Amino acid sequence: MNANRIFLAFFLIIFYVPLVASEKAFASADISGAWRFKMMCGQIEYRGFFSLKTPSPQKAEALFEVMINTHNVGMLNTAGNYNKSSNELALKSAGFIPGAGQFGPFDFTLRVNDKRNEITGTAQGSAQCSAFKAWKTTIDTQRNPAGIIANRADALTRVADVRNIFQTRPLTSQECVSLMQWHIDTTVINTPDGAVSSAFADAEKMRNVLGFAYDEFTDIDSRAYATASRNCSRLFSQSPDATHAALINQYNNHFRNVPAGFTPYTIGNSGPKIRKTSNNSFRVNPDWYRNMYIATSIRDARAYKNDLIRQIETKNNSPEKLKILAGALQESQSKSGWFAYLSESELKSVSIHLDELYSKQYKSLVNVTLDEIPWSNYQPTLDGLKALKEKQDEIENSLKSSLPDSGMKYVADQFDIKKAPLSKTLTDNIISSYPGVDISLQGLRSYRSDKERYYDSHQEYLHPDDQKRLLNHFTSSLNESLLKSSGHFSLWLEQEIPGGGDGVSALNQISLDLLGVPVDQINGSNYPSNLKFVADALISHSNKVKVAACVVPEGFEDMKDVVCQKS
């Protein structure tokens, strides 16, 4: 068994890494390089990677590596054919890797998309497997010799020399500040496939500080990193510098606040891809595959986001661009598709940016449409405002299927801007031409018809500010006339309302004109002081007319003769 595991480690170091790193060498083949995949076989969901190359125009080879469970990693060699013109890819099992867990055998019938960044298809094997899907990704194998760990670990060939290298080349205070601050700045990113440390997803940040990304995290790197962390903690715990004390406190609190259940997946606990065990054998680490699967998903989501925004920003304004933007904005706001793999802060930032682009785009399209309208043809008259309203309805109906609510509001706002001066001029003309309410019974009674003529028929087409201004003018004119009429109203009723049934009918009409209800429905306590005297006078005079005309209440008509004879 140890021999097999040693072979496996040797195979991965010698064969796998160059295969992943060789993506540029096969760039002309488009599909060569690293791919992340998932598929279901029965109740098992397989997640992992395969490195694909095309050694000749119609041939393809792939090494699959998959986390079978929390204890084992399966590997499978495949070979087959690739038809670039039809994008069809067929791979058949070509042997297992000694020392690895068994994955397969499977034969894959696949199809590459036109962009050559996704593969879909099926896997046939002993287990019943459902759809297979893979995404082009990148395994970051670059190393930075200036990194805190790499500039020491890269000089080592044996694990046993890790402690000695930090004794001969101890960490500086500034290196420890960089190491601890990098730790403090890491967060947990939640995705549909699980949570992962941002350290694994942010390859460049990790490489700038440690000298490598998590992708290239070796056994020596892991042990050197652990030693460096302990040394920095010891150094700052003993330092008289207050800034060091504050930093070590933040550092310790950061680890105390790691979410429950997430501790195994921090860099200090998850370990490298291949680990040397206590008996000098090698073990492939399933945690590395788990973390890398999620980390590359996040990186690919970021690449998708950046590519999408770049395409949107360089694309000419068109309804098609607006449709793309709308879909991207909906995905970001619902955290679906690739956007589900972004951190909360990234998601918020891209949603804001997409919303700004969307707003800018639909405003541009709306403005093109609005610029074609002959605004000068619309006059400050009721007919002019009606025509403008018809044009607004026409434009809104033509755009409502492609604009969001905010876009429709923008259209309405632009029409309001154009309508405002026309509405103001028309309102000014009505106010200057309306003589006000005449101080007479007939003048008061004509108020309602005047209001209907000048206000009610116009308000739908006026700007809201002018609606309010015109209504205030009519209301204040009525109030002024009512104030001047309060001492005369009862006398006017006595002089102008006939007796008998005609008088009752006339009083009901006056009541409708002034109060909106017939006399029998007047409740004097419900009216303000400027109308209360009208209500009281109408009730009083109505009672007199009814008595004189012998008008009985509704429902007592059969008693009319008796009542009238007695009276």
Image (spheres, grey):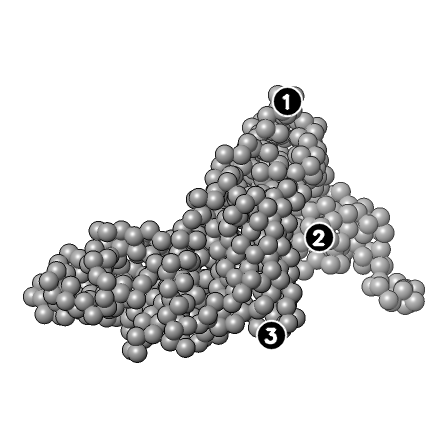
Q: Position of residue 266 (x, y in %)?
A: 34, 68
Q: Nearer the viewer, residue 137 or 509?
A: 137
Residue at the (63%, 72%) spot, across then down: 127
Task: Give the foreground label among 3 and 1.
Answer: 3
Q: Position of residue 477 (x, y in %)?
A: 59, 38
Q: Nearer the viewer, residue 474 or 541?
A: 474
Splitting the image into 4 quarters, where does residue 6 fall?
A: bottom left
Q: Amino acid at mark 3?
A: Gln
- Residue 198 marker: none
Which residue is farthest front? 3
Q: Secondary structure at mark 1?
A: loop
Residue carrying label 2? 538
Q: Secondary structure at mark 3?
A: loop
Which residue is farthest left? 240
Mark 3 and mark 1 lie on one chain; the one further toward the N terminus is 3
Residue carrying label 1? 374
Residue carrying label 3? 43
